[in-house]
Image (cartoon, rainbow, N blue to C red):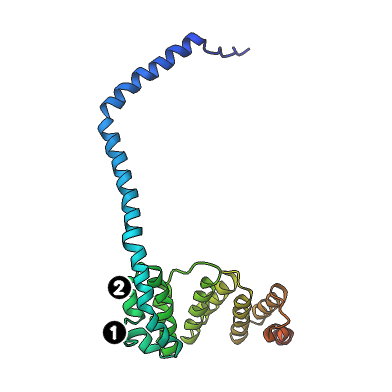
Amino acid sequence: MAKRKSSPSAADAQVEVQEVKTTAAPFLEKNQNLLLYGLGALALIVLGWWGYKVLVAEPQQEEAVGAMWQAQVQFDRDSFKLALENPGGGYDGFLGIIDKYGSSKAGNIAHYYAGICYLQMGDFDNAINQLEDFDASGDLMPIMKNGVLGDCHSEKKEFDKALDYYGKAASSGKNDLLAAYYLKKLGMLYEHEGNKEAAREAFERLRRDFPNPSSPDWRDIEKYIYRAGAASK
C-alpha cells in the first residue's frame, strides 16, 4: 500500500518562507541596476509611442487630409491622371500623398484612390500594385478592395485570379448590396468560363442569402439560375 504523502508542518513552512526571503534579497541587490534599466527602457518605449502619436501621426494625418482634397476633386470629375499626378493649385496628387504621408490613414486610402485611377486609365498592373498596398479594414473596404482587384485581373484575362477575388469580395465584409453585386459577378464569370455548376451555386447563394426585392439583380436571379442549370443538362 502506498504511503500517503505527509503535509508540511507550520514550522517547515516558516523555514521555506525564510529561505525564499534570504535568497531573493541578494538577487535584488545584485540586479537592481538591471531592473531599473529595464523599467527605464519600458518607459521610453511608452513615451516614444505616445510622442509619435501626438507629435507625428496625428499632425501628419491632418496635413494629409488637407492636402488631398484637390486630388479628390479631380477624381470626382473623372480626371484620373490629374488626380494621380497633378490636380492643380500646387497640391499633390494621390501619388504625392502616398510619398509624403504614406504612414497616415489618408496616405493609406490614397493607395485605394490611386488603384481606381490606374484601373480607369487601363494600367492594370499599377492598379493591382496600389490596391495590394492598401490596408483595408471595416465592413466596406475589404469588399471594395477584393472586388476591384477582381476587376483588374478580369481585365487582364487572368480569370482564375478574378474568380478568387470576387469570391473573397462576396465573403469579406458585411454589406449585403456589395456582397450580392460581387456574387453576381462571380456567377457570371463562372458562366463565361463554362463552369455552369459553380455559376448556379453563386446565383443560388445570392437568391438565398441576400433577398432584396427592390434590386433588379435579385428579381432577375431566377433567370440566371435557370440559364446556368439548363445549360448544364
Q: Position of residue 172 (x, y in %)?
A: 56, 69
The image quarter in which residue 179 lies: bottom right
> Which residue appears at 36% of the width and 80% of the height?
94
Q: Answer above or below: position of 108 versus 82.
A: above
What is the crowding at mark 1: few (fewer than 14 residues within 10 Å), some, or many (at least 20)? few
> Which residue appears at 32% of the width and 44% of the height?
43
- Residue 233 visible in the current orientation: no
Q: Give me the disc on residue 90.
A: 1
| Quarter of the image with the C terminus in it | bottom right
Q: Mark 2 or 1 closer to N-term?
A: 1
> Which residue appears at 33% of the width and 71% of the height?
101
Residue pointed to by mark 2: 100
Q: How many marks?
A: 2
Q: Give me the disc on residue 151.
A: none
Circle 1 sits in a helix, a strand or a loop, which is it?
A: loop
Residue type at mark 1 is Gly
Numbered disc in front, either 2 or 1: 1
What is the crowding at mark 2: few (fewer than 14 residues within 10 Å), some, or many (at least 20)? some
Residue type at mark 2 is Lys
Circle 2 sits in a helix, a strand or a loop, which is it?
A: helix
Q: Answer above or below: position of 233 versus 62.
A: below
Closest to the observer: 153 or 32?
Answer: 32
